[in-house]
Image: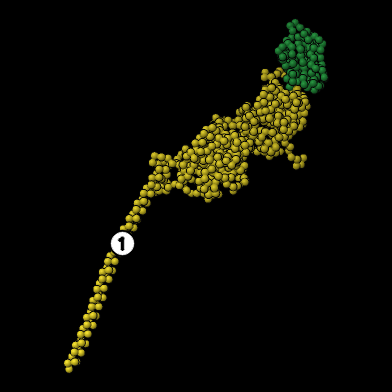
């Protein structure tokens, strides 16, 4: 697993670990400040990925309070939002990710058979 | 905050700032609602761009519907170079794409992302003006309406805190007419609400604007027509100007010398409204053209609204009556032709107001007002406002009106006659297989005008009045008048002849009588001289007799 915490003034560099192709799932979590909702979302996303995606994922956390320009790229309105960049097509879910079932459906993260 | 005057942010939209007495409430959000195609986005764009260009206030547009490129292309025709304003960091456009499918929500969330973006955009250009177009699109994307409303309320509070002047556009709600917007956003924006409307009546669309509320400020409450054309939006604050306009005693010529003298003071009063009404073919347009010609000859600007003829057609037709308008065009004369059905009444009026304010004419011709179609009360109201408007600007106006039925005043004339200061009625009578034209001044306020019905003739030299011939059967015109005149001439000649004859006869008789008198006199003289001779003879006789007696006496004495 790879995880990158984007912070100012770093540009968006999803492949900081240099293994982008190896990640089946590339997820980006947008938050705005360290609010309880944001913290819950980070926690929930990590737990969920660890449970369902084994090692084949990367999570990038973007704090819009630090980097507001990045909000436009993924058309972020609601906070928190998770965007699944890979595999295509792009998918989004919003909320603190406490409803695991809906996250899995919304991001189309199929639990791998036999896991 | 005692006595604090609400500060206002001018929109730069001509007319709108007049209606709102200065513009939108500065530092507060304004709701602009209207159905699709009302011009909400254009209004908002104009507010932003004019803000930059005229008032030095940078702006932010958060568009939920159109991309920056599309928006820029839409207003490029108005001469707004949006892209270069963006490059100069005076304008920021953030296109928020709304996912039409809706987004799965997986727990608690808020719209902080929107706030972050808006905040970022405002800071990037140091914006004073913000437009959110169309905010309600969020309702399609976020299923939790309760949360959305909370967030919107927070957004408006947030905008107020920032002190930015904001326009929030929203779709007009369908169904319930009491709801201004589809999702009831008006609940949150309480400072200023503007309603745009594009109504179709009699197959003619008219754009209207109304200020539903404006907290803390006086404002016009009417529906104001507004135009969107190549010069952008113009709102037309057309209200009854009241009757406080300046009144002039100056007189300007009607262009027809005889008509000038019929009016008593030598023409129309400056700033008065003149109605020339008449049946088809009585020369209403010609009367107007003569007036225009006279104005143009003095170098006065004149604006002619033609509802039935194109400018070229007018010029050609008027040339046939000796009025050359061609050389006035492009200079002092402007002819605006448009079919009456092309716009609604409001729009015609709006266009006129704009043209009048741009061209600044001293005289206006509207030919004819009778072709303005609509509900009669509306036509009347439109004309009333037009008359007031022209009067308030001191513009002399000539309206022509086609009388539809063969009587002095048709219904339409009657309803507007009270608006007019001078009413010249044209008519014609048909006798002896010909039609002759008559003119009379039906009314003319403030003038000792002629009460005479005059015949006039339109020739290639213009309009000439002919004294009407009043005969036993009424006014005689045309050939009937000529025949009557000939007959009178004959009768008069016959009478003259008779007099001469009588004179000659009298002379002759006088001569005869004088002759007789002379004859008698001579006879008398003869008798007198005869008598004298006789008297002399008798005296002689008497003397001789006495002489004889004396001699006889002497003889007798000698014998004794």
Residue count near mark 1 (Cα–Cα under 10 Å), binned few <14, some 14–19, many ≥20: few
- In this view of the protein, which residue sits in the foreground, B364 or B178? B364
- In this view of the protein, which residue sits in the foreground, B342 or B194? B342
Q: Residue furthest front?
A: B558
* Letter of the yellow chain: B
Left or right: residue B298 compared with residue A24:
left
Q: Residue furthest top?
A: A114
x and y, in percent, of residue A70 in the image: 77, 19
Residue B79 higher or lower than A93, as above or below: below
Residue at (75, 17) in percent of width and height = A82
Where residue B188 sits, quadrant-wise, is top right
Give the position of the C terminus of chain A as an image quadrant.
Answer: top right
Residue at (76, 9) in percent of width and height = A24
Where residue B7 sits, quadrant-wise, is top right
* Letter of the green chain: A
Left or right: residue B296 compared with residue A113:
left
Residue A91 higher or lower than B495, as above or below: above
Residue at (51, 38) in percent of width and height = B322
Res B541 seen here = yes
Residue B176 higher or lower than A71, as above or below: below
x and y, in percent, of residue B175 in the image: 61, 28
Q: Residue furthest bottom?
A: B560
Chain letter, disc 1 residue: B
| Residue to which mark 1 is pinned | B511
Residue at (69, 19) in percent of width and height = B99
x and y, in percent, of residue B347 in the image: 59, 33
x and y, in percent, of residue B4 in the image: 75, 40
Give the position of the N terminus of chain A as an image quadrant.
Answer: top right
Residue B132 higher or lower than B399, as above or below: above
**Under tag 1, what secondary structure?**
helix
């Amino acid at each position: 697993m790879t995880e990158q915490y984007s912070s100012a003034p770093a540009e968006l560099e999803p492949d900081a670990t240099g293994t982008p192709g190896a990640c089946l799932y590339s997820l980006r979590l947008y938050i705005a400040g360290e609010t309880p909702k944001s913290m819950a979302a980070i926690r929930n996303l990590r737990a969920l990925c660890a449970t369902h995606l084994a090692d084949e994922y990367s999570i990038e956390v973007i704090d819009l309070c630090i980097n507001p320009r990045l909000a436009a790229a993924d058309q972020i309105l609601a906070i928190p939002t998770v965007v699944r960049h890979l595999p295509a097509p792009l998918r989004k879910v919003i909320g603190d990710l406490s409803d695991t079932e809906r996250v899995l459906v919304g991001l189309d993260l199929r639990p791998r058979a036999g896991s | 905050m005692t006595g604090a005057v609400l500060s206002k942010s001018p929109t730069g939209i001509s007319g709108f700032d007049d209606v709102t007495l200065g513009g939108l409430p500065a530092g507060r959000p304004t709701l602009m609602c209207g159905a699709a195609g009302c011009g909400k986005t254009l209004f908002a764009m104009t507010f932003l761009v004019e803000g930059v260009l005229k008032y030095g206030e940078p702006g932010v547009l958060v568009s939920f519907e159109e991309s920056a490129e599309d928006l820029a292309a839409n207003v490029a025709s108005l001469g707004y170079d949006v892209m270069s304003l963006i490059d100069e960091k005076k304008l920021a456009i953030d296109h928020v794409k709304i996912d039409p499918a809706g987004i799965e929500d997986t727990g608690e969330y808020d719209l902080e992302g929107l706030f972050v973006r808006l905040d970022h955009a405002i800071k990037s250009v140091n914006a004073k003006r913000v437009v959110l177009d169309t905010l309600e699109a969020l309702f399609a994307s976020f299923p939790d309406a309760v949360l959305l409303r909370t967030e919107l309320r927070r957004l408006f509070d947030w905008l107020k805190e920032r002190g930015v002047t904001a326009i929030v556009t929203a779709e007009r709600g369908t169904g319930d007419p009491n709801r201004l917007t589809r999702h009831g956003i008006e609940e949150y924006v309480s400072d200023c609400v503007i309603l745009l409307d594009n109504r179709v009546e009699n197959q003619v669309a008219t754009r209207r604007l109304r200020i539903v509320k404006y907290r803390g400020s006086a404002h016009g409450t009417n529906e104001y027509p507004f135009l969107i054309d190549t010069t952008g939006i113009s709102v037309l604050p057309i209200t009854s100007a009241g009757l406080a306009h300046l009144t002039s005693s100056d007189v300007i010529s009607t262009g027809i010398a005889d008509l000038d003298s019929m009016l008593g003071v030598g023409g129309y009063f400056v700033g008065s409204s003149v109605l020339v009404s008449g049946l088809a073919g009585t020369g209403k347009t010609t009367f107007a053209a003569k007036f225009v010609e006279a104005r143009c000859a003095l170098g006065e600007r004149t604006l002619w609204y033609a509802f039935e003829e194109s400018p070229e057609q007018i010029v050609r037709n008027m040339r046939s009556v000796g009025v050359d308008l061609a050389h006035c065009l492009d200079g002092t004369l402007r002819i605006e032709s448009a079919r009456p059905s092309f716009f609604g009444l409001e729009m015609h009026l709006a266009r006129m107001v704009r043209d009048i304010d741009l061209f600044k004419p001293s005289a206006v011709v509207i030919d004819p007002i009778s072709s303005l179609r609509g509900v009669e009360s509306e036509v009347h109201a439109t004309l009333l406002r037009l008359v007031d408007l022209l009067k308030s600007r001191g513009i002399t106006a000539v309206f022509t009106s086609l009388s539809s039925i063969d009587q002095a005043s048709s219904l339409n004339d009657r309803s507007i006659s009270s608006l007019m200061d001078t009413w010249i009625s044209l008519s014609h009578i048909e006798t002896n297989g010909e039609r002759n034209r008559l003119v009379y001044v039906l009314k003319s306020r403030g003038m000792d005008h002629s009460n005479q019905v005059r015949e006039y003739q339109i020739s290639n030299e213009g309009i000439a009045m002919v004294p009407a011939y009043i005969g036993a059967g009424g006014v005689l015109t045309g050939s009937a008048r000529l025949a009557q005149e000939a007959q009178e001439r004959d009768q008069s000649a016959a009478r003259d002849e008779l007099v001469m004859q009588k004179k000659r006869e009298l002379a002759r008789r006088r001569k005869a009588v004088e002759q007789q008198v002379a004859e008698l006199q001579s006879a008398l003289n003869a008798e007198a001289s005869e008598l004298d001779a006789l008297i002399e003879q008798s005296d002689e006789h008497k003397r001789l007799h006495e002489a004889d007696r004396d001699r006889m006496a002497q003889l007798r004495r000698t014998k004794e």
